[in-house]
Image (cartoon, helix red, strand yellow):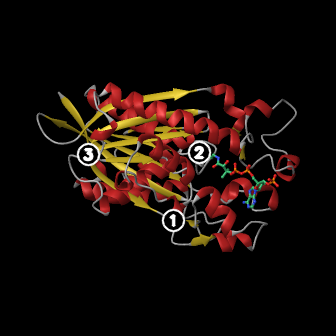
Amino acid sequence: MIRSRIAGIGHYVPEHTVTNDDLAKRMSTNDEWITERTGIKERHHRKNRNDSEETTAFLGFKASEKALEMAGLTAKDIDYIIFATLSPDYYFPGCGVLLQEMLGCDTIGALDVRNQCSGFVYAMSVANAFIKSNAYKNILVVGAEVHSFGLDFSDAGRGVSVIFGDGAGAVVLSAAEGEGKGDILAMNMHSEGKYADELCTKFPGSKYGWSDRMRLEPENVTDAEVYPHMNGNFVFKHAVTRFPETMEEALKAAGKTVEDLDMFIPHQANLRIAQFVQQRFGLPDEKVFNNIQKYGNTTAASIPIALSEAIAEGKVKRGDLVLISAFGSGFTWGSVLFEF
Ligand code: UT7
């Protein structure tokens, strides 16, 4: 039996922090509203909005270096890359190939996953399937975002732009054989595309690229159509329904109960969502890890950043049973239950 074991993990965020008060200087918002509605106190943004150095692939590269170091591997040992992001460096190609080049990996496969907030969970499910089928031995799974370049910092965008932050997390998932600690025990993935328009960025997109138009027109920019749109209340209501469903499904599939869990790490979308789910399952504070207060919502990066921090702080130890769950744009949602 081949086990899928997390051999290494790391995270990286740009140095520059942006507090709620900093945002209040740029738009009609305030620390009280942001804290009360989301739990967020600050987030990291790359310093210069036009900085072409601190790209999404670069943040992923920095996180990957740390994950490789913890795993005791080099880039040459990696035989597949899975990169989850909604904010790629280019419209195409994806960030996976850019990371392959930055790390100096061999000409290995590089897959990009576009499942937004659930991106990392989806990416882990693919990596697990590859490992279990003996296709690859060491897979680098990355979630990274640079949101700060693509948010509307005018009053019109305040409902979205105060929430998101930049950052990256990376995991080396390795094949292990025989008895021992560490394995992915259960996973489930879901989608409901009828709600695609409730949380999306529409431009540039081929749906709008009819023959006499370019990929983007100046009016798309002036009409703020290039920025993310989120029907916050609607997304919130679905999130608090889908989180418990996917969590229960994963636990049941592995023959575990919520009492068996050592740690639950939800996608860091909103502290109120995480607290609702915690209460619903009666989980004590020490069994739920949140760090949205410091990073905001970093979409595909939020779970690997949180898992990396929880491990670094000794809150997740080898052999612990950990559940990661996400819900977001698509709608997509899912969970991965694993022994660390
Ligand atoms: O990670 C992907 C998945 N995403 C999520 O799970 C997000 C789910 N949704 C949410 O987290 C919440 O819906 C938000 C935090 C986005 C919004 O919180 P809310 O309690 O649903 O607020 P709301 O959108 O209903 O807005 C309430 C009021 C509005 O004013 P009026 O119409 O009541 O006068 C907004 O205009 O708050 C206003 N508002 C703001 N005020 C100050 C919206 N954004 C801001 C702001 N600062 N940044």
Q: How many marks?
A: 3
Of residues 22 and 166, the one drawn nearer to the viewer in this rendering? 22
Label 2 to label 1, Cα distance in Å? Answer: 21 Å
Q: Quadrant of the C terminus?
A: top left
Residue type at numbered disc 2: Leu
Queried on whether the Cβ of the residue with tag 2 lies below 8 angstroms from ligand 1, the answer reads: no
User: Is the Cβ of the residue at disc 2 closer than 8 Å to that at disc 3?
Assistant: no
Residue on which the image places disc 1: 294
Residue type at numbered disc 3: Phe
Which element carries disc 3, helix, strand or loop? loop
Of residues 110 and 316, the one drawn nearer to the viewer in this rendering? 316
Asked whether, in this view, residue 245 is left or right of residue 153, the answer is left
Q: Residues within 10 Å of mark 2 (few under 14, many from 20)?
A: many
Quarter residue 16 falls in = bottom right
Queried on whether the Cβ of the residue with tag 1 lies below 8 angstroms from ligand 1, the answer reads: no
Asked whether, in this view, residue 245 is left or right of residue 40, the answer is left
Q: Residue extending furthest left? A: 179
Of residues 340 and 33, the one drawn nearer to the viewer in this rendering? 33
* Residue depicted at x 50% and y 37%: 243
Q: Say if residue 186 shows up in the picture.
A: yes
Residue on which the image places disc 3: 340
State which tag comes first along the sequence, 1 or 3: 1
Which x, y percent locates residue 268?
51, 51
Which mark is on residue 86? 2
State which tag comes first along the sequence, 2 or 1: 2
Which element carries disc 2, helix, strand or loop? loop
Which x, y percent locates residue 210?
83, 30
In this rendering, which labeled residue sits more in front, label 2 or label 3?
3
